[in-house]
Image (cartoon, rainbow, N blue to C red):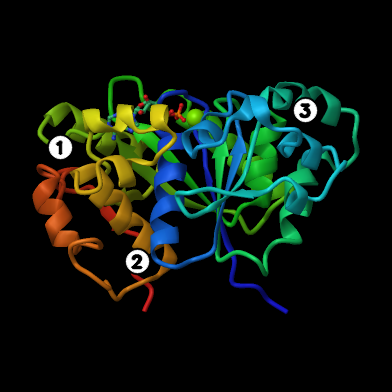
Amino acid sequence: MVSNCRTYAIANQKGGVAKTTTVASLATAWSELGLRVLAVDLDPQACLTFSLGLDPDALELSIHDVLLGRVPARMVIQPVAEGPHVLPATIDLAGTEAMLLTRTGREYALRRALEDLHDDYDLIALDCAPSLGVLTINALTAADEVIVPLQCETLSHRGVGQLLDTVYDVQRLTNPELHVLGVLPTLYDGRTNHSRAVLADVAMRYGLDVIDPPIPRSVRFAEAPAVGRSILRTAPSTPGALAYRVLARRLAGVTVPADESVYPSVAVVEAATTGSAGAAGPGTPMANVGERQ
Ligand code: ADP
Ligand code: MG
């Protein structure tokens, strides 16, 4: 039976580009839509685990044990107040890569673990570590789509080529079905020519689509992880939260907003996120990721 579960890897080996924020926000927004969601923490720093309200230090079992084949993922997954289920990480994950290195089929460890869960979830989001090591290759091997969050500042493009080389290797060797959805502008300030120029440069240089809507920069984002809540709860009507809701709806192919105040139209978000409409300037496609009908 073919499952409808879609798996998104959020990857960029640069730290601080909002990978974890994106996974936490999308997972929360998808849950609000009534979808069954699993958020997977693949970073030994366990920021996703923490920011969704679990204490990594108090966990007996984690994704480390799953990747090493010691326990099934179901034994480790926990529901959280924000709505999604979480496959949590602990600092043990720092040792997983070394332990996997001697194993045949190490790239497939996550894929194998998640395959059993495809009937249980509509969407799975993978929060990658800031590296291109075995854990990120596991994520890319397990994913249908990869989203590359990008902070639009000078030198942002450095590393994108390397990430894409890794993606091409994965497509060739372990996951021919992997598709690059595009770059997601995060911490975006559409008012500055600089952000727009950086975005246009990266999109052109690497032939990547730019995912719409961009996620505007907002100080309110910094507050959410500390209290184990998503931005969608701590600051539900900020432009950033609205943008993540629109993105979540598009990625899930949900077209009918149940309540416009909670699920605003794209126009509302674009009005709120200064200059986001056509923000990349003339000649640069702002890819609409496609509201599937
Ligand atoms: P990564 O997982 O790529 O390392 P994080 O999601 O942890 O990045 O984000 C890095 C920092 O940036 C965090 O402090 C987070 O709160 C902050 N941040 C994320 N998105 C935004 C945003 N749109 N506006 C302002 N700050 C943000
Ligand atoms: Mg992170």
Q: What is the secondary structure assignment of the residue under circle 3?
A: helix
| Sequence-first tag of 1 and 3 | 3
Q: Residue type at mark 1: give it.
A: Gly
Residue 93 in the image: state x and y as whole percent.
Answer: 71, 27
Residue 1 in the image: state x and y as whole percent.
Answer: 73, 79
| Sequence-first tag of 2 and 1 | 1
Residue where numbered disc 2 is placed: 290
Residue drawn at (14%, 52%), measured in percent from left and top? 270
Camera sees residue 201:
yes
Residue drawn at (32%, 41%), measured in percent from left and top? 231
Residues at circles 3 and 2 in contact by the CB criterion of under 8 Å: no
Q: Residue type at mark 2: give it.
A: Gly
**Vertical relation: 240 (above or below) 201:** below
User: Nearest the camera: 44 or 212?
Assistant: 44
Disc 3 and disc 2: Cα gap in Å? 37 Å
Residue where numbered disc 3 is placed: 96
Residues at circles 1 and 3 in contact by the CB criterion of under 8 Å: no
User: Nearest the camera: 163 or 221?
Assistant: 221
Which numbered mark, 1 or 3, is in the foreground of this view? 3
Residue drawn at (52%, 38%), measured in percent from left and top? 11
Q: Residue type at mark 3: give it.
A: Thr
Disc 1 and disc 3: Cα gap in Å? 40 Å
Q: Which mark is residue 190?
A: 1
Indicate left or right for 285 with 136 as reference: left
Occupied quadrant, residue 127: top right
- Within 10 Å of the Cα at label 1, are there few (<14), some (14-19), or many (20+) other Cα atoms? many
User: Nearest the camera: 15 or 220?
Assistant: 220
